[in-house]
Image (tube, grey):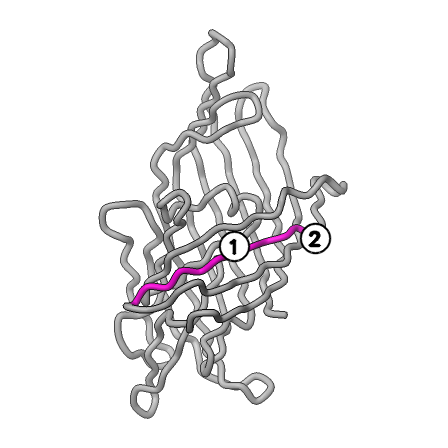
């Protein structure tokens, strides 16, 4: 999940944070992501650790009236699984609609739930921006969306400083989300998954342009699983899975 911020001065020691890039703006990032899954299902998949190196591009397709549409494309430069090289997933291109507060909706699935791309290590766009001006050290509540699943929790403006002469803002947040039971395509048949997600993030952003400089994100999930074998009359198999995704992203 990439955070992009526009920061404007509001008083001597406070800033207003909002997602408001201009139409046509572009950014490119390198991201290194480690995904660990621990699955407890009789006769099912072993524990897996997958490490991915991605190149990610952002293009703002449209901006205005407090809503921005961003196209995100990602190419996997290399992928290893349990220490061995494996074929990389196909390139991905997904569009998001993002409001000023930083809430992102995946336009393909019309959901703010973490998608399959997150489990593959691709950060989605989201940002826990405050409803008004904040000062360094100030914390705010970022409520979960009403009417559908999504992240909510607390965020804090750590500090305002300079990097290579450029003003930047540093934000930390701890967010959570309840994932309702959802059926996904599995290798051997449908998989029903539901549970809790926790996202801890820290990001640094250019003040003048609102562009992400770098971020560190740790996403953890505890899921309930139910497997149904295709072309089989056997009852579904139940179990659990723990997911950890650690992603470091930096603008290039």
Which residue is drawn at the image coordinates 58% and 23% (left, top)? 44
Secondary element under disc 1, as helix, strand or loop, is: loop
Residue 131 placed where, x, y %?
Answer: 26, 70
Residue 61 part of the magenta segment: no
Quarter residue 111 falls in = top left
Residue 51 placed where, x, y %?
Answer: 66, 48
The relative height of residue 111 versus residue 235 in the rendered view (above or below) is below
In this view, the residue in front, 58 or 251, is 58
Q: Main secondary structure of the magenta part?
A: strand
In this view, the residue in front, 7 or 216, is 7
Secondary element under disc 2, as helix, strand or loop, is: strand
| Labelled pair 2, 1 in contact (Cβ < 8 Å) | no
Quarter residue 31 falls in = bottom right
Sort mark 1 into few (<14), some (14-19) or many (20+) by Cα contacts within 10 Å.
many
In this view, the residue in front, 62 or 204, is 62
The C terminus lies in which quarter of the figure?
bottom right
Instruction: Write down the region rendered in magenta.
Output: 66-76
Q: In this view, does 47 lie to the left or right of 118?
A: right
Mark 2 highlights which residue? Answer: 77
Residue 251 placed where, x, y %?
Answer: 59, 69
Which residue is drawn at the image coordinates 28% and 64% (left, top)? 141
Toward the top, the furthest residue is 233
> Which mark, residue 123?
1
Residue 25 placed where, x, y %?
Answer: 49, 71
Which residue is drawn at the image coordinates 57% and 39% (left, top)? 37
The relative height of residue 237 versus residue 52 in the rendered view (above or below) is above
Toward the left, the furthest residue is 146
The relative height of residue 252 versus residue 195 in the rendered view (above or below) is below
CA gap, disc 2 and disc 1: 15 Å
């Amino acid at each position: 999940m990439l955070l992009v911020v526009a920061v404007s001065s509001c008083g001597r020691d406070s800033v207003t944070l909002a997602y408001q890039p201009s139409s046509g703006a572009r950014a490119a990032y390198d991201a290194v992501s480690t995904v660990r899954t621990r699955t407890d299902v009789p006769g099912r998949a072993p524990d897996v650790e997958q490490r991915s190196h991605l190149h990610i591009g952002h293009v703002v397709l449209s901006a205005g009236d407090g809503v921005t549409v961003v196209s995100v494309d990602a190419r996997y430069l290399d992928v290893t699984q349990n220490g061995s090289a494996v074929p990389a997933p196909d390139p991905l291109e997904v569009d998001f609609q993002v409001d000023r507060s930083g809430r992102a909706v995946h336009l393909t699935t019309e959901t703010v739930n973490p998608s399959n791309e997150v489990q593959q290590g691709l950060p989605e766009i989201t940002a826990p921006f405050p409803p008004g001006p904040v000062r360094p050290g100030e914390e705010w509540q970022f409520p979960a969306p009403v009417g559908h699943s999504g992240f909510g929790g607390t965020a804090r403006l750590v500090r305002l400083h300079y990097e290579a002469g450029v003003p930047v803002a540093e934000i930390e947040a701890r967010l959570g989300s309840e994932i309702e039971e959802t059926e996904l395509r599995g290798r051997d048949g449908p998989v029903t998954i539901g549970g809790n997600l926790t996202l801890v993030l820290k990001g640094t952003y250019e003040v003048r342009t609102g562009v992400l400089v770098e971020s560190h994100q740790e996403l953890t999930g505890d899921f309930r699983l139910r497997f149904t074998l295709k072309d089989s009359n056997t009852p579904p198999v139940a179990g659990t899975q723990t997911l950890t995704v650690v992603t470091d992203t930096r603008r290039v």
